[in-house]
Image (spheres, rainbow, N blue to C red):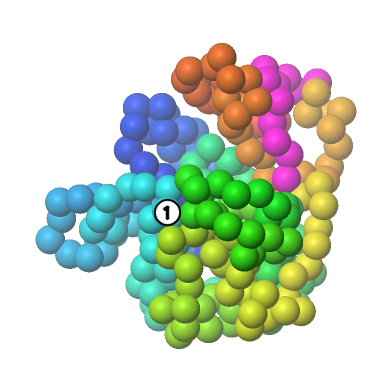
Amino acid sequence: MEILILSIYSETDEYREMLEIQRAYVTQYPCVHYYFITFRKFQDNDVEIENDMIYLKGTESLLNITDKTIRTLEYLLPRIKVDFIIRTNISTIVDIPKLYGYCTKLPKTNVYTGDSDTLKCIDPIIGITDSTFFGTEFVIGCNLIMSCDIALFMLYRKLELHYDIVDDIAFAIFIKRYFPNAFIKDPNFMLFVPYDLTIDSLVNIGLKPIFFRNKVCETYKNITDRKMDIKNMRTICNYIYS
């Protein structure tokens, strides 16, 4: 079994530091294809690959992440054979051995899973301007797992995706329409990392999480940078991969 992990990335000083943390461990697994994907405004080709980095011609924005993901899959899936696609982001640490073990237990088709939420409020920033899609249960974008058959069908019908809605909700709307039985609900799949994580607190959390989402600034509004996220990422990697 082989899996493809795509990590959303953009060029900033703090994200570059996160990138180096990720690169220290993601290359250890021969059955895992791991790429960081980002936009680059000025380049000759639509897609350019430099080692583990995929550059797409375009401009970064929240609502462009759907396009970023789809164009990457269009390029990669004809070139590599994988069973599952995992979409995450640069600040989320993935326990790759645990993820791989989880995927081996899944059926090879009709799978859409990960820690989820339900759309229930208007938010123009993510493209939700009315109640049309309220009640849609969606896998949160930094821990999304789908089988390759769903990804290929999504590419075939890519024009039907809602590119004006944030990526994880847009994917969920599409999958709900064409693969209504694909969703495998898996609570506690992802840990929203608390402020100033320690090894002891990770030991107490237990074995369940596969994805560790580092974004403490969402909870602690007075934080203006992501230095604590970087510290927590190092702590998690030391815990998982030491």
Give percent across and percent down for residue 87: 55, 57
Q: Where is residue 131 shown, x and y percent of the image? A: 63, 59
Q: Quadrant of the C terminus?
A: top right
Compared with residue 49, is residue 211 higher up or lower down, i.e. above or below? Answer: above
Q: Is residue 26 visible?
A: no
Position of residue 75 measured from the top left corner of the image (x, y, whole percent): 35, 72
At horizontal 20% and vertical 50% (from top left) the residue drawn is 41
Within the image, what quadrant is residue 236 found in? top right
Q: Amino acid at mark 1?
A: Leu
Residue matched to label 1: 63
Q: Report the span colored magenta.
A: 190-200
Q: Nearer the viewer, residue 76 or 186?
A: 186
Horizontal and vertical percent position of residue 66: 45, 61
Q: Horizontal placement of 80 versus 193: left or right?
A: left
Residue 42 placement, left or right of 47: left
Residue 76 is left or right of residue 215, and the answer is: left
| Residue located farthest toward the top when viewing the structure as drawn | 222
Question: What residue lies at 83% left-to-right and 42% top-to-bottom?
Answer: 207
With respect to residue 145, does 36 lie above or below?
A: above
Q: Quadrant of the N terminus?
A: bottom right
- State the SS at label 1: helix
x 80%, y 62%: residue? 185
